Image (tube, coloured by chain):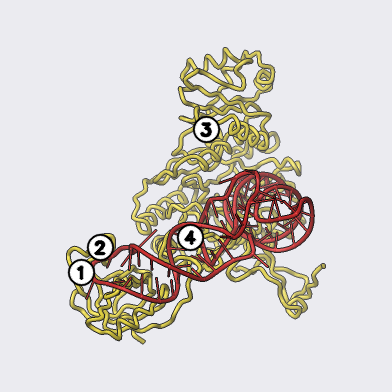
Chain colours: A yellow, B red
Amino acid sequence: MLKRTHTCGELSSQDIGKEIVLNGWVDRVRDLGGMLFVLVRDRYGKTQVYFDPAADKQLYESALKLGNEYTVGIKGIVNKRPEKDVNTNMSTGEIEVMAKELVVFSESETPPIYVNKEDDANENLRLKYRYLDLRKEKLQKNLMLRHRVAQATRNYLSSTGFLEIETPFLTKSTPEGARDFLVPSRLRPGLFYALPQSPQIFKQLLMVSGFDRYFQIARCFRDEDFRADRQPEFTQIDIEASFVDKEDIFAVVEGLLKYMFKQAAGVDIQTPFKRLSYADAMDRYGSDKPDTRYGMELKDLTGYFAGTSAAFLKSVCDNGGVIKGFTVENRAEKYSRKKLDEFTEQAKKAGANGLIWIIKDKDGIRSTIKKMAEKELQSIENDGIINSGDVMFVVAGEQRSVNKILGQLRSQIIRDEFEKLDGFDIMWIVDFPMFAFNEEEKKLEAEHHPFTMPNLSDLEMYEKTDPLKIKAECYDLVINGYEMLSGSVRIHRKDIQKKVFEMLGLPEEEINEKFGFLLDAFRYGPPPHAGCALGLDRLVAVMCNEDSIKEVIAFPKTATGTDIMADAPNIVGERQLRDLKISLNP
RNA sequence: GGGGAUGUGGUGCAGUUGGUUAGCAUGCCGGUCUGUCACACCGGUGGCCGCGAGUUCGAGUCUCGUCGUCCCCGCCA
């Protein structure tokens, strides 16, 4: 084998005159008749190789047979390119390799996707031929950055005393949360393992064991419907520590991210991160994961309508509701009536009674409520709430619902209509409520998870009267509108845990069945502990400026959870099913 | 579970109110060419228009169904 002495990305004018060997793929062949240029590519870069018939006719002729994506070994001499032929777009553009020997390791059929072009092929094909797609520069860069992120994580956390410990994939189904992926047990027919949705319980057990600083780059599995930022299996940087409070976890995460962004992406980020309470986030952006770079904050207009004669607005005001809206600039001319109707339709689907729009253009104010609220609109205009060219979207109703509807509309407009902004908008979201009310099942649910420490003075004050007012010691980290991290201080006291389970309406029997081993462990001196999990895929995607985490996962799955390349999931043999004592309903 | 978009030579796209032989670019094959770098130029190959039914004298185009993919809502403690 003709083994490489150099990679395709490292030769420079320093190496002129050396005899070297390159290994790689043929990126492109340029046949000028009397001379032949071949670009050879590996993951480090590309180098131009030159075949000269005058120097070696036979070698030249064998090089004529090269096709794209052939794998080759080439021995040659590093030459300086003529001054006028230096390619300043290439890192190796000052030199070229004068070929002396060529070995074709393997030929390639015409590839179904272009490896040497960045234009995107159809996503179906990209996934089917993922190994070719992965040869492309963009995905190679993304995965290299992902490696640096993982490496930085290990370096930083190890150097601050964290231990990397693995937890099982074959474990037990836990209630609530996402749907589990199940794995049938052969030795215990009829029983199932579940793949972990996260290592949550195991890492808490590790705290009980005294591994007071733990981390893991852990694969997690959730059988739900997928999105651009959600795959059935994904990776978390899972962190837990003992004898710490919230501030300690913030410091660890801020230190880690600062180091990681610098090491992996060469970016300096400011710490400490800004903090926004859940209530403020919902009030100002209608979302618990706002991208604040785009502005368009929600404004409360209720005051303008206190004495309104418009019946439906008056009834909202009288019943303690709110009238809020946000402004999109420079859209007055752009939104057609049809577009506005579409927005209205969407708002209704999200639960609004209707969507009020107010447009100020060169002819003045136009609005759905122009006739019934002329005076109110005048005041809004006079106060400079709306400027020429602006479109305001306004919703009236119960506060939480209004925030949510406007937040969704805001996100949609950002997603569909705005150029992506550079930079990283990083913030902690804090002071989440402990519980949410599930309307369908008419009972309390844990907003984060049932091991989250409630704010103790809140618990005391509102336990019996208004549990929705109890805040939790938990936190999210949001970057550019993505939930990147979620974590909490955990309950380590039996009495509090019991109380929370009771409030959630979990019967003792069910508690023991589902969390028994954790509660057992907590009988033997659990330390105060807290932690979090960072979404590695989302984090890398944001660092790579990608919209979809598929672009930072080597072998991702489609929205229906299939792997087009491997053709999974798939049927299995009778024998396998028999071993598992599983029969399929026709 | 719901909504939207999409499927046409190997690949990326166009295809008008249904109307002769489905077009363009690129790739691929062949040819010319000694400094290209997305080499250029000339010639050629290549498609049952995702699949199935229907309407029609006639369907890439219209209707219904079905499958795949993408995005969103629900869901994701």
Q: Which mark is residue A552?
A: 4
Q: Residues within 10 Å of mark 4 (few under 14, many from 20)?
A: many
* Residue A133 drawn above or below residue A274: below
Disc 4 secondary structure class: helix
Q: Amino acid at mark 3?
A: Arg
Which residue bears the numbered disc 2?
Answer: A87
* Residue A400 appears in view: no
Q: Position of residue B9 (x, y in %)?
A: 55, 65
**Which of the two labelled residues, at mark 3 and mark 1, occupies the earlier sequence position?**
1
Q: Quadrant of residue B69?
A: bottom right
**Which of the two labelled residues, at mark 2 and mark 3, occupies the earlier sequence position?**
2
Q: Quadrant of residue A564?
A: bottom right
Q: Position of residue A443 (x, y in %)?
A: 74, 42
Residue at (62, 70) in percent of width and height:
A567
Q: CA distance from mark 2 to mark 1?
A: 9 Å
Q: CA distance from mark 4 to mark 1?
A: 36 Å
Which residue bears the numbered disc 1?
Answer: A81
Residue at (30, 84) in percent of width and height:
A59
Residue at (65, 20) in percent of width and height:
A313
Q: Amino acid at mark 1?
A: Arg
- Chain identifier of the residue bearing label 4 in the image: A
- Whether labels 2 and 1 share one chain: yes
Residue at (44, 39) in percent of width and height:
A293
Q: Amino acid at mark 4?
A: Val
- Whether labels 3 and 1 share one chain: yes
Q: CA distance from mark 4 to mark 3?
A: 32 Å
- Chain identifier of the residue bearing label 2 in the image: A
